[in-house]
Image (cartoon, rainbow, N blue to C red):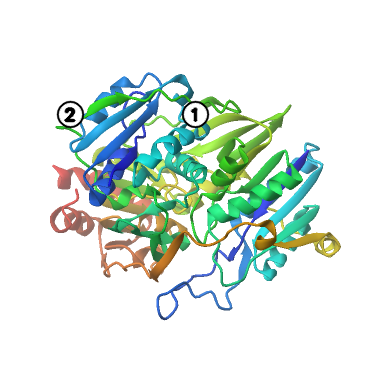
Amino acid sequence: MAILVIAEHDNRNLKTATLNAVAAAQVLGDSIDILVAGFGCETVATETSRVPGIKRVRLADNKVYANQLAENVAPLIAEIAPEYSHVLMSSTTTGKNIIPRAAALIDVQSISDVITVEAEDIFRRPIYAGNIIATVKSNDVIKLMTIRTTAFNIAASEGGSAAVETLNSIHDFEKSEFIRNDLAISERPELTSAKIVISGGRGMGSSENFGLLEKIADKLGAAVGASRAAVDAGFVPNDMQVGQTGKIVAPELYIAVGISGAIQHLAGMKDSKVIVAINKDPDAPIFQVADYGLVADLFDVMPEIDGKLSEYTS
Amino acid sequence: MKVLVAIKRAVDYNVKVRPNSDGSGVDLNNLKMSINPFCEIAVEEAVRLKEKGAVTEIIVVSLGPQKAQEQVRAALAMGADRGILIKIEETIEIEPLAIAKCLKIVCDEEKPDLVLMGKQSIDGDNNQTGQMLAALARYPQGTFASEVVIDNGSVFVTREIDGGLQTIKLALPAIVTTDLRLNVPRYASLPNIMKAKQKPIREITAEELGVDITSRVSIVSVSAPVGRPEGVKVGSVDELLDKLKNEAKVI
């Protein structure tokens, strides 16, 4: 049984989400290849070759793969997929964009958002916004799937020395053109990989008030997130959204501030190890998932936390 | 320019679903059904493009039981011109790949310039059908769209990606799947609901299309997620910080 993991990267660095997919692959077997498709991305291939336990890195380095457009990467995956029993990619927006297209090209029903591997053909995945967990069995010969990153550990990234082999296939669909990325620039850790996340909801009241969270986030090395209500109210941009329709996070510590706890928000954070809820409404549903609840006005307690934090973190 | 909008009948987003008693599936008896919210956004976008003059005809297509006609009618009431209902038995849970194969045949017949659909349905949460249809129809794809601009034989799609936004340009015909921020769907007015009753809906079956809709992925069982143990309320900031440091050991 050979397994292929598709690397996610920006042509310079391997994205950590790839290592979650590697961890899922390791549950399935130990003959694992990683495909690095990009442009000018030899450093990514080198970095990938150091992931322990990888048999080989397959490098497709061509300008058609520069922005990992699904139209070009999917046929590359479809071309080499028959060499494997399983093809895995993390369930990021890139993975969700590419894997179903590759699956349809080889007539496979792919499986989205796998959270556990029960057997080589049996997997568990959340449906209905995580309100139901389905155990599913794939009857396809090749299994293509995306991996919910928060459900798997981050595989080790150093110590291996896999061979790097070049793949020369060029798939250029031509009808699709990358124009630009407008990426949010932040000094803080990425939401999906941060150990601590502090999120604000509609209760924050304004964009400026998110400054209260940012000050605390910087002291904790935390990422700042938001509920959909806060995004819809225009307080913060959508890339900060935690929830079923935003990012799925599972940090060591999740602090929900002024968030009522709508189902769709809970779906994005309820697998966090420790959850703190701060809300002035004692009946807010967020308290049902919180390990520690503080019923209080956030505008009183956030400055107090900010002031006292150093006494507890030193 | 002709737009095809694919929509799905799904459990209303306000309804909390539960596994049935033997854990073999989800209990859907007597639950309120609606147009999947992402699909509703796709219908709205098509109607807005028509109102701007970029689109001349909107065809709405759905796969589902006979009752899915309600959702097709609702889309017609929002402003679509005609409907296609591809009927399947109510007990069958059709998978994205099979849906994409049926829609591919509709694309071959209707030759739309643009296909709009939701990025995922809130029941299966697969987020696959648009990408699969794009592969089968050999269309370029713009997934998770927060902005759609038609321009001279192309469509510019702004996509919601993990780190922010991405803009791509696709040659028409193309497939665009919609994300939440693209628009806020309208409520159909009473006159438009009445008018929609006169709009044509063509009914066919998946068998008539010659598509094999047999499941590739079978459901072994379903269960409710494991709940979290009950937490505690703390009385002060000091108590909270003390517990986070000394009990949970996370700061």
Classify A302 as above or below A126. Answer: above
> How far is the residue under mark 1 from the one under mark 2?
35 Å
Classify A113 as above or below A57. Answer: below
Q: Amino acid at mark 2?
A: Ser
Spot occupied by residue B64 in the image (x, y as percentages of width and height): 64, 64
Instruction: Decide if residue A293 is on the left or right side of residue A162.
Output: right
The numbered mark at residue A161 is 2
Spot occupied by residue A157 in the image (x, y as percentages of width and height): 20, 35
Classify B37 as above or below B52. Answer: below
| Visible residue check, residue A233 | no
| Visible residue check, residue B229 | yes
Spot occupied by residue B224 in the image (x, y as percentages of width and height): 38, 70
Q: Secondary structure at mark 2?
A: loop
Q: Nearer the viewer, residue A17 or A309?
A: A17
Mark 2 — on which chain does it sit? Answer: A
Residue located farthest toward the bottom when viewing the structure as drawn: B21
- Please tell me if label 1 and label 2 are on a single chain: yes
Residue, disc 1: A182
Residue in the image at 44% along x and 35% along y: A79
Q: Nearer the viewer, residue A310 or A223?
A: A223
Residue in the image at 80% along x and 63% along y: B193
Asked if the residue at tag 2 contacts the one at tag 1, i.e. Cβ–Cβ closer than 8 Å, the answer is no
Residue in the image at 37% along x and 18% along y: A40
Spot occupied by residue B89 in the image (x, y as percentages of width and height): 62, 70
The numbered mark at residue A207 is none
